[in-house]
Image (cartoon, rainbow, N blue to C red):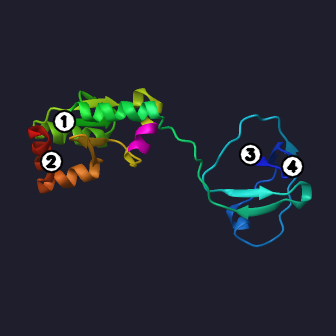
Amino acid sequence: MALRSIKSPTLITPTAVVSSSVINKPQSIRFSLKPTAATTLAVHNRGPSFYGTGSNLKLKLTKFRCSASSLSPQLKDTLEKLVSSEKVVLFMKGNKDFPMCGFSNTVVQILKNLNVPFEDVNILENELLRQGLKEYSNWPTFPQLYIGGEFFGGCDITIEAFKSGELQEAVERAMCS
């Protein structure tokens, strides 16, 4: 865990390990700290933060998220063009001939069962695409199905829509437009 001293911008690392049971109890915690020459700042989601120097180090529980976005304007434009270029687009792990995860395979089999022509995009080939797509769709998992240029859902939503007939209706509307 990377820590920043208030008195100086030097990154420091604790040499003591604090268990979650210690963190949850209000008490005084002392650390032996060693400065590091690290030049990379690691940002952790939802973890304790420390402030102070030397033996006066205090623990403050905070929750924060890194605001860096992996969805650049160029990637956003590319994704918009890609999802609107075909009536049905499936972002998946692997491809329709060789799915590399069970959820992706399930959606492929559903689309094949409905005889739906679709474009497949292997998100495992490009990490930037994979992370950017999560932001673009506001959906954290794959596969991601787009119908008529709009995000339809992941595997669970696709299964439920297939069972109810909603998926076939959405595909038919997209094919006719």
Name which residue lies at 13% across and 57% down: 164
* Residue 23 seen anywhere in this rendered image of the structure: yes
Mark 1 residue type: Lys
Mark 4 residue type: Leu
Badge 3 local density, few (<14 within 10 Å), some, or many (20+)?
some
Mark 2 vs mark 3, foreground winner is: 2
The answer to which image quadrant residue 53 occupies is bottom right
Q: Residue furthest right?
A: 55
Element under disc 3: loop
Q: How far separated are the C-alphas under marks 2 and 1? A: 10 Å
Q: How far separated are the C-alphas under marks 2 and 4? A: 59 Å
Q: How far separated are the C-alphas under marks 4 and 3? A: 11 Å
Residue placed under numbered mark 2 in the picture: 170
Mark 1 vs mark 3, foreground winner is: 1
Label located before the other in sequence (2 or 4): 4
Which segment is the magenta one?
A: 131-136
Locate residue 57, reporting x and y percent: 85, 59
Mark 2 residue type: Ala
Element under disc 1: loop
Residue placed under numbered mark 4 in the picture: 33
Residue placed under numbered mark 3 in the picture: 2
Element under disc 4: strand
Mark 1 vs mark 4, foreground winner is: 1
